[in-house]
Amino acid sequence: MRSETKVSGDTVKRNGYSFVTISQYQFVLIERFAKVLVTELNKYPTDFIMNSGLKEVTLVANLRVGGQRRVAMPESETRTLYFDVNYPGARDEYCSHAIHHEFFHMVYFEMHNYFYYKDPAWMELNYPGFRYRGGGGLAYGNYQIFKKQKPVSGFITPYATYGLEEDMAEIFAFLMTRSGFPILTYWMQVDQRLFNKTNYILQLMSSRSHGFNLAYLKKIHGE
Ligand SMILES: [Zn+2]
């Protein structure tokens, strides 16, 4: 597991979040993350990115939101995705997942002008009486929570049970990653709720970019 490198940039503090800018001496950190970033962003049809509202991607170190260490943060005002290239223990696979997960939050914000919009049609897809646990921030820092698969009917990870927006972002990230895609398509066959939810996300994707569908994903994942 990769440990945190001591960085020697300037600390930038803004409303609710902070980070350290990376000096040229830590270029190796940027290079490593950027390779993953380029590979993952290249998977998207150009018009999907154009319609996403995303304006900028900023690579920083030691990102904190409300004091809590984060691997990534979507910032709605400037439509910027911040990524921490120095997040402790983050393997490439974890970074790939985080890139798509956070990008989804930006796409969802662009659609509803709100990160936490409670889509009533989505709520219908959960089992009756289900309630989300109240926001992804509660589970953050528990890295293990991303690794364990298929905890509850209709949810791809335990993290997905923390909030509607996290549930959607998790399915989206599984669709977009090479390691996640076969896991999700397997569970779609045995879990009707997950099947319905994944189709909902696929519809959302093709509504933003014609031709961005399951066949497209199978192609990019080499299936
Ligand atoms: Zn999230």
Image (cartoon, rainbow, N blue to C red):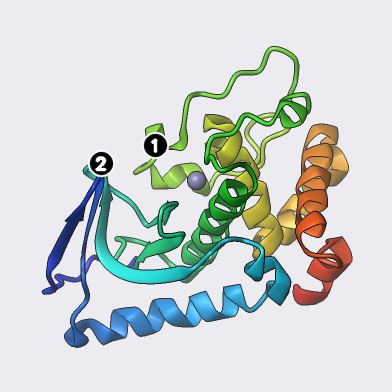
Q: Earlier in the sequence, mark 2 or mark 1?
A: 2
Say the numbered circle drawn on residue 156: none
At x 65%, y 47%, the residue is 111
Q: Position of residue 11 (x, y in %)?
A: 13, 63
Label 2 sits on what residue type?
Answer: Gly
At x 25%, y 41%, the residue is 66
Can I make out residue 35 in this image? yes
Is 211 placed left or right of 137 in the picture? right
**Is residue 124 placed above or below 83 in the rendered structure?**
above
Q: Position of residue 156 (x, y in %)?
A: 66, 42
At x 30%, y 85%, the residue is 28
Q: Nearer the viewer, residue 42 or 210?
A: 210
On the image, numbered disc 1 is attached to which residue? 137
Q: How many discs mark residues in the rendered view? A: 2
Q: Are marks 2 and 1 in contact (CB under 8 Å)?
A: yes
Using the numbered discs, state the Cα–Cα distance from disc 2 to disc 1 in whole angstroms: 10 Å
Label 1 sits on what residue type?
Answer: Gly
Say the numbered circle drawn on residue 66: 2
- Hey, which quadrant is residue 160 in on the image? top right
SS class, disc 1: helix
Q: Position of residue 56 (x, y in %)?
A: 45, 70
SS class, disc 2: loop
